[in-house]
Image (cartoon, rainbow, N blue to C red):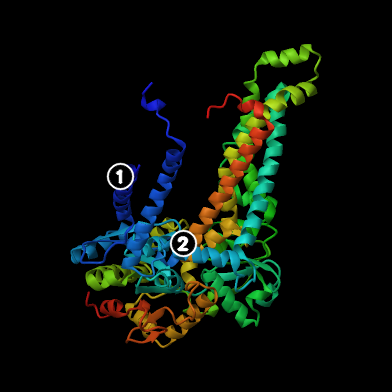
Amino acid sequence: MRRLMNLAPRPGIRLLLGLLPFVLIAFIYVAASAERRAVNPDDKLLPPVSEMVAAANRLAFEPDRRSGEYVLWSDTAASLRRLALGLGIATAIGLTVGLGIGVLPLVGATLAPLVGVLSMVPPMAILPILFIVFGLGELSKVVLILIGVTPFLIRDLALTISALPPEQLVKAQTLGASTWQVAIRVVLPQIMPRLIEAVRLSIGPAFLFLIAAEAIASDVGLGYRIFLVRRYLAMDIILPYVAWITLLAFLMDWALATLARRAFGFAYVTERR
Amino acid sequence: MTKILKLLTVAIAAAALLTAAPLSPAFAAKKKEFNIAWTIYVGWMPWPYAAEQGIIKKWADKYGITINVTQINDYVESINQYTAGKFDGVTLTNMDALTIPAAGGVDTTVLVVGSFSNGNDGIVLKKGKTLADIKGQSVNLVELSVSHYLLARGLESVKLTEKDIKVVNTSDADIVGAFKSKDSTAVVTWNPQLMEVKAELGATPVFDSSKIPGEIIDTLSVNTETLRDNPDFGKALVGAWYEIMAIMANAEKGKAAREAMAKTSGTDLAGYEAQLKTTRMFYDPADAVKFVSSGDLPKIMDMVRTFSFQHNLLGDNVKSKDAVGIGFPGGKTLGSAKNVKLRFDATYMKMAADKKL
């Protein structure tokens, strides 16, 4: 049927169409940068690509003049460590508490309202309390990610479990399964793909909280560097850092998507491509 | 296929031209409407008060122009917006004027020298009673700010260097909360946060800006080109400023003004007056002219630019502290005379002193 909704691009054209918005943005950037440079040769707001490449090279492959460290790599290592800890612990808590709330009505009645309320607390607004309780070191940064991400994971999983067909749970019980067996053998495999998807969706917020935490009190990290050089408008450093963060987040998202399809292929059988 | 490509190229070019337009900087020329930005700080509160009371409008009307006064919540952002061309003037310190707009190629003129910090910036320790005790501690401060400069000057005075301590970049909005944490034993900050930090149990102030008087200067600075093309812009601002200064200096009449400024900055009259005590205000334009024209200012700016250069604030590719030139009244310059990007100008304040506005 020749309708717009049935008009699919061929693979070559598809690639071209996908690249088009990127090319467009790059083009606009280069034009705007050149125009600002023409007016003020020292303009820092939109540095030309060559300067960003030079800055990125300097940060990645030349030791820092003062500390002797390779700035980009030490920042990345510190940030990824915080992010991995934060997201990892959040996932573990999200899975256990979500499973508890979803499977056990007693736990649900006790914790669901609390989680519902906690998920509405803006973490950034209670920072001073976090500082006093968790200090200014690594812990408070990990905790900020935890507070920001965990309630979402818990609620998402509990909702997924409540959407499972009750017949399944009843049937497992008539076959003699205990609560534990139902939770581990029936519920868990079915919510794992959803857990991975929820974590994928949380990568963005997790980065947001990480960078906010690093902006507030830190001496190393991707967010620290961005907010430090923002003081003198060094966009030639900030923009490559933003691109790098985007790439890292994209790779993490892609890795999780691949993992989900490999490990839980059954959940993606009906996926439309 | 090639046809599609050609079409795409044209479309991209057209879109780029359309979208790029708002990103291009404002061109200086004769204009009628001006924008200045301010942030909350004791020495800058007269600006919003002047705008509220219609004093800015009165002076702008006198010269047939319009001046919009806008508050920006974040200090660094206000300077960045000015540097990017969104504002014609901004309230900032001498060091930030050198390291952000001037180092960014935006020729900037210090139009009004309103005050200098005389105790408004300080170092406070929880462990130790003198500045020398800071050795080996980690210090929470806004890195690369005037606090960092104050710390460097303080360390110098007790024969320590930055290698003897660890600097932890901490947002000024969160520094009070940070100091309450047991991890934090030393901070450098400015008012109003400094008052809160000093009030902390067991906290000892060990060094403050009254020991380096005149080195942290609070200014209103404007785009040099805009000022050159529109001297009336400068005249109106300076006229309005000194009208407020005359009111503030008066103990009786100034009370209402100080009370209003206190409220706008989120404190009460007592709190604001405590901050004023540690600020050396130039109520009299003649005092400001004297300060700007004195031989001490180039010496101060030399220390500031040396610190800035050592911390890469003049740019990563800059090979010497002379790269960005600084101009002073009477045609004196410091550093590259060909690349003067920061100018201290007493002309307009002199007009106010001579009552010629």
Q: Position of residue B61 (x, y in %)?
A: 20, 62
User: Viewed as shown, does residue B25 lie left or right of B266?
Assistant: left
Please tell me which residue is depicted at 59% across the width and 77% down the height of the picture. Answer: B154
Q: Numbered disc 1: what chain?
A: B
Rounded to the nearest whole Å, what is the CA distance between mark 2 and mark 1?
33 Å
Q: Given this view, does label 2 or label 1 mark the residue nearer the observer?
A: 1
Q: Is residue A68 visible?
A: yes
Which residue is pictured at 23% across the width and 71% down the height? B229
Which structural element holds mark 1? helix
Q: Would residue B172 be seen by someone viewing this image from the given angle?
A: no
* Residue A235: assigned label: 2
Q: Are marks 2 and 1 in contact (CB under 8 Å)?
A: no
What SS does tag 2 mark?
helix
> In the picture shown, does residue B16 fall above or below A91?
below
- In the displayed structure, would residue B41 be above or below residue B337? above
| Residue furthest out toward the top | A174
Pick out the residue farthest to the front. Answer: B2
Is B31 located above or below residue A130 in the figure? below
- Find residue B97 and report its horizontal and vertical position in percent: 42, 71
Q: Say which amino acid is labelled 2.
A: Met
Q: Quadrant of residue A267?
A: top right
Q: Which disc, if any, is residue B213? A: none
Q: Label 1 is placed on what type of residue? A: Leu
Between A242 and B174, which is closer to the camera in this rendering? Answer: A242
Q: Chain of mark 2?
A: A
A155 left or right, relative to B232: right
User: Of residues B192 and B86, which is closer to you in this image?
Assistant: B86
- Residue under numbered circle 1: B7
